Amino acid sequence: MDALSTRVILGGDGCRLRTAVCGVAPAARPRGLCILLQGLSEFIEKYSEVIDELRGRGFVVATFDWRSQGGSQRCLADPCKIHVEDFAQYDADLAAFMEQVVEPLAEGPIIALAHSMGGHILLRALKSRPTLVRAAVLSAPMISMQTDGYSPRLARSICKLQTLLGHREDWVWGADNIDPLTMSFDAQRVTRDPQRFARTQALLRAAPELRTKGPSWGWLDASFRSISRMRQDGFGRTLTTPLLTFGAQSDRVVVSADCRTLMQGLPNARYVALSDAEHEILMERDSIRAEFWAAFDAFVAEQLSGPQ
C-alpha cells in the first residue's frame, strides 16, 4: 500500500476521526470511489491488502476509523475499551465522513465495501438514504451476534441489567482479558489464515496505540437496540440499494442464518455463502478470498454498467 493521505475530521459531536484516502493504482483505469468501512476493533492499516486490491481495480479508496478504535478518539479513560452510547453516534460519524471526505472526492460512481459492524452501520444509513452509494458489498454484516452460550434473550437481559446498575462504561464480562497482542492463533475465532492473523499482530506491535480489546456494556446495549430495530418487520421496505452480501459458513461472531434471512427479504439484495470461511472473510485464506473477489468483480461490473 502506498503512503496514505490521512487527516482528522470531526464527527457529529466533535469526536476526532482519523480518515484516509488512497488513489487509484498507476496502471489501473479509474472507475470511481470505494468507501471502506471496517468492523469492531479494527483499524485502517489492517486493510492495507484490501485497499491495494481495490486500487488495482480502479478505485480511489476512502476509509476511516470508527470512534473509540484505531487512530480515532477514544471515548473512555481506558483506551482499549470500545464504547458508544447509541449507534446514532456512528450514523453521525459516517455522515461527517461522507460530507467532509467522500463528497469532495467523488467524480464518478461511489460504491461501498463494509465488514461486520461497518455493514450494520451502512445498512442503517441506506435505509434513510438508499442512493448514498451506487451499490454496496457487505462482508459478514452484523445483523445479529453470537452470544457465547447464552440465549439471545438472556444475553440482552443481562446487558440491560448491567446498564441499569450503572455499569455502562465497564467491560463486558471477559472482554478485558482478550488482548490482540498476546492472543494465539489457536485461540482466535475470526480467520483460518495464520499469516494474515500474524500480519495484524505485527501491525499492532509496531503501533500499539491502535490496539483495542473489546466493548463496554454500553456498546453492547447500543448494539442490541440497533439489531432489534433492524430485525423489525418493514426495516428493508425502503432499502433498495443493490447489495451483494457474503456470509461466512463457519462464522462464530455473527449469525449468518439471520443475515441470509434479512437479505432474502430485501428487494435488491443477493446473498453468497462462503463455505469454510470464518468471520473475517477479507482476512481469510487465498481460496476463500478468490471466491469473494470473483463475485465482487462480477457484481461491481454489472452495477457500474447500469443506468446512472
Image (cartoon, helix red, strand yellow):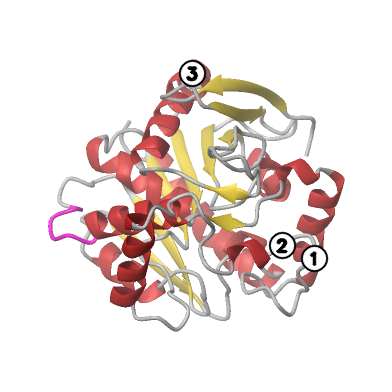
Q: Dot 1 lies on which element?
A: loop
What residue range appears in magenta?
Answer: 231-236
Q: Residue at x 30, y 41 (%)?
A: 126
Can I make out residue 94 in this image?
yes
Q: CA distance from mark 3 to mark 1?
A: 37 Å
Structural crowding at the residue carrying mark 1, measured as other residues with C-alpha within 10 Å and reported as few (<14), some (14–19) or many (≥20):
few
Q: Is residue 154 left or right of residue 284?
A: left
Q: Secondary structure at mark 3?
A: helix
The residue labelled by disc 1 is 182
Q: Residue at x 61, y 29 (%)?
A: 19
Mark 3 and 2 residues: CB-CB less than 8 Å, in contact? no
**Mark 3 touching mark 1, by CB under 8 A?**
no
Which residue is the extreme one toward the front? 165
Disc 2 crowd, CA 10 A, few/some/many (<14, 14-19, 20+): some
What is the C-alpha distance between the residues marked 1 and 2? 6 Å
**Residues at marks 1 and 2 touching, judged by CB atoms closer than 8 Å:** yes
Residue 100 circle label: 3
Q: Position of residue 184 (x, y in %)?
A: 78, 73
Q: Estimate how packed mark 3 is, as few (under 14), some (14 to 19) or many (20 or more) residues with alpha carbons within 10 Å.
A: some
Q: In the rendered structure, which amino acid carries the disc numbered 1?
A: Thr
Residue 282, placed above or below residue 80: below
Task: Identify the residue under disc 2.
Answer: 179
Q: Main secondary structure of the magenta part?
A: loop
Q: Quadrant of the C terminus?
A: top left
Q: Quadrant of the N terminus?
A: top right
Q: In the rendered structure, which amino acid carries the disc numbered 2?
A: Asp
Residue 1 lies in the magenta stretch: no
Q: In front: mark 3 or mark 1? A: 1
Residue at coordinates 59% horizontally, 50% vertically from top-left?
81
